[in-house]
Image: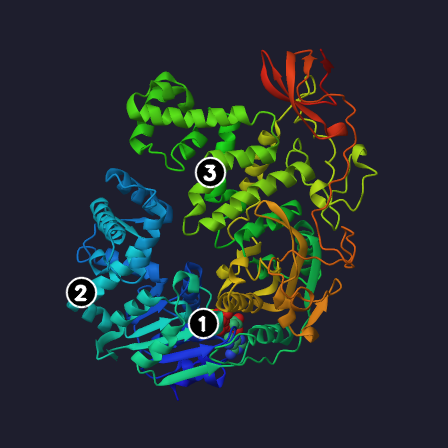
Amino acid sequence: ATLAASPLLAHLNPEQLAAVTLPAGHALILAGAGSGKTRVLTTRIAWLLQNGLATPGGILAVTFTNKAAKEMVARLSAMLPFSVRGMWIGTFHGLCNRLLRAHHQAAGLPQSFQILDTQDQLSAIKRLCKQFNVDDERFPPKQLQYFIAGCKEEGQRPRDVVATDPDARKKVELYQLYEEQCQREGVVDFGELMLRSFELLRDNDPLRAHYQRRFAHILVDEFQDTNKLQYAWLKQLAGEEVDGHLEARGSVIAVGDDDQSIYAFRGARVGNMADFVREFGVQRQIKLEHNYRSYSNILDAANHLISHNSARLGKNLRTDQGPGEPVRVFEASSDIAEAHWMVDEIKQLVKNDGLARQEIAVLYRSNAQSRVIESALFNASIPYRVYGGLRFFERAEIKHALAYLRLLENPHDDTSFARVVNFPPRGIGARSIEVLQDAARAVGCSLHDAVSTVPGKAGANLGAFVALVDVLREQTQGHNLRSIIERMLDATGLIEHYRTEKEGQDRIENLQELVNAAESFVTLEGFGRDAVALPLDEHGAPLTQSPASQGLDVDAPLRDAPLASAAVPGMVDVDTGETLSPLAAFLTHAALEAGDNQAQAGQDAVQLMTVHASKGLEFDAVFIGGLEDGLFPHENALGDRGGIEEERRLMYVAITRARQRLYLSHSQTRMLHGQTRYNTQSRFFDELPEGALKWITPRHPGFGKFAPDSGAACAYSAGSGGRFGFKSDTFASPPVPPQKAAPAHGLRAGINVFHTKFGEGKVLAIEGTGDDARAQVSFARHGTKWLALAVAKLTVVD
Ligand code: ATP
Ligand code: MG
């Protein structure tokens, strides 16, 4: 009783208090979102320490993300009058790393072992395959990578794998060789971190006994998302297994919510909860049913939605807070319009409701969705930060693609050259690159120009790379930006490279999104503009239109919107009319957008992240965009019940992040994966309680009622205020682009022209209309240039 009187415990409800002050022993806390699970876990650590029931060294706490771990340490430091260093708080990978560094000799590793990320791992496997002359059609390196990662997740070394046919035996042999190579080089991949430290504990009795004695208190947050190996690892630390029953020394407290299990695709096993109760002989299970996070409209939405799942462990959530604002639902005509609506609402939340920007989150199902939202925030000068993923233009695959594009513009861009000379891998090793760099340095030329001086096979490989880029440049002369990017993605093998990679689908989507970015850059901003934002109307169409665009059909689809007003002076040479090529202008735009709107550390910024990355977090206001069938729920999940249920849990996680305000939106059209899609709203809208919602735009019949057997998510009904004006009984077909006015300049590709400064040349391409018209001209003596026709004086010569 005296222990319970601590001020730490003042604000806990009776169930929480019981959980925090549990006597030694194992326990499962099973409770819904926002019920204080994480808070209970943190408070229990503080309570144990404060009352001398544990020392900092006796605590091991596992959280799901580094961010969550940091937050836990920070909160503990604030609660306690002494230093909390010495506690082991971190992610599974982080804790394994710590264990292996501490016992590197016993684990058979150099202390300074390097960690291979997924990319590095693949390169290592490719190198290996080359060395042993492995037929990479029969044994694609990426498949070997899955195979190895899968074995490790199952706790299997090569000798443990049962191989029945020759191919399987070959894979196991390669797994063995890969292990030897990693061992020789002193590197460890992610799977190895986990498996190696598991084995270290399993095979080393004194060490295991030491840690079992030491960690009297093991606490695991987000237990529903642990996989098989992680669970086995926990068991090693907790105690000795005798006849399937664990004779544990310390206490293990696991905290979880089956409704928030969202990592099945990575091997997470909800079944670990039942195993834990059985194998640990858990006596105490505590349910927390009071939600402290959200107003009841938000909670009702979450409860309603998740009640559509079967096989739940069954929990209820209630709140004492009032209903709060209704959940606002918006239907946009396009993804851009959706982003603009979000930005408008965010502005109001900050201005009228006094919310801090960092208390506002925008969540999305797929990473590729962030680009349009980033762009809208950028144009509105609202600082934002992207979590659990890089900002669009900083993502590795985008940087690789941009490097190729830069090389098309400028073959002597050495940074870009070095970035992609061996990406995708084409057998050019670090050694060859070194030789090349030395040669370039000696002569004082670019890497590109030094290639011919490198002898032998290395020289031939380098030559092939240079030829690839040079040919691509040649072939894309006169092409528009979209076509240049598409051909580049294809010819360089970037798309192909990611096709079979584990997280490759996401990267491919991002690369396709780059095509969209270029497209809307050209149509909305006009390529000559120095990344200056145009004011847009609520549909996302530019407000300032050039004279040439006036009188065009206002219902024209956004993507065919007329070009913006003429190129900004300064980007055009006023004497010659020379302007940046669309590609160069786009690259400038990309560099600017990547460069400086990223919120400074500590700056108040809107938070952008995927729903997966939002787990465990909370915000005053939450926006969930792209609620369309095929996107959320994701198209890969539409086929089976299990898939839909996992998507529904994901949606449950998303909704329950919100404290005060929740905004849901979907869009009739969306540029995704390189094409316009016509979407129906997510089936999840049918599973939300009407009374908690407020439709800002008129509500449509839901998925189930409207298109019962349409899995393709391509139906669209009108009468919605949609701006495309389809008849109400028709399904959408791609909108017809507006008629382009006949060009006034009288130029077309193929004809010869004369320029006062550059002399004779041939027109390769024309872009834009009216004041925006530009021509790409290949001059005999001055090479290829882009000219703004409103400025450049060109005369037709034939
Ligand atoms: P999730 O499932 O999303 O991880 P959770 O169950 O871990 O949620 P917490 O993040 O611990 O929930 O708590 C949700 C919010 O409720 C936090 O802001 C927390 O401070 C607050 N909270 C928890 N318990 C109480 C309480 N007894 N009184 C007041 N606020 C509380
Ligand atoms: Mg939590």
Look at the picture and state if 359 lies above or below 140: below
- Residue type at tag 1: Thr
In the picture of the structure, the residue carrying the numbered disc 3 is 400
The residue shown at (69%, 43%) is 559
The residue shown at (33%, 23%) is 459
Q: Identify the residue at the far right of this view.
A: 551
The quarter holding residue 655 reads: bottom right
Marker disc for residue 203: 2
- Mark 3 and mark 1 lie on one chain; the one further toward the N terminus is 1
In the picture of the structure, the residue carrying the numbered disc 1 is 38
In this rendered view, identify the residue nearer to me: 241 or 254.
241
What's the distance in space between the residues labelled 3 and 1, CA to CA? 39 Å
- Residue 19 in the image: x percent, y percent? 41, 81
- Residue 246 in the image: x percent, y percent? 25, 78
In this rendered view, identify the residue nearer to me: 567 or 547.
547
- Residue 588 in the image: x percent, y percent? 58, 33
- Mark 3 and mark 2 lie on one chain; the one further toward the N terminus is 2
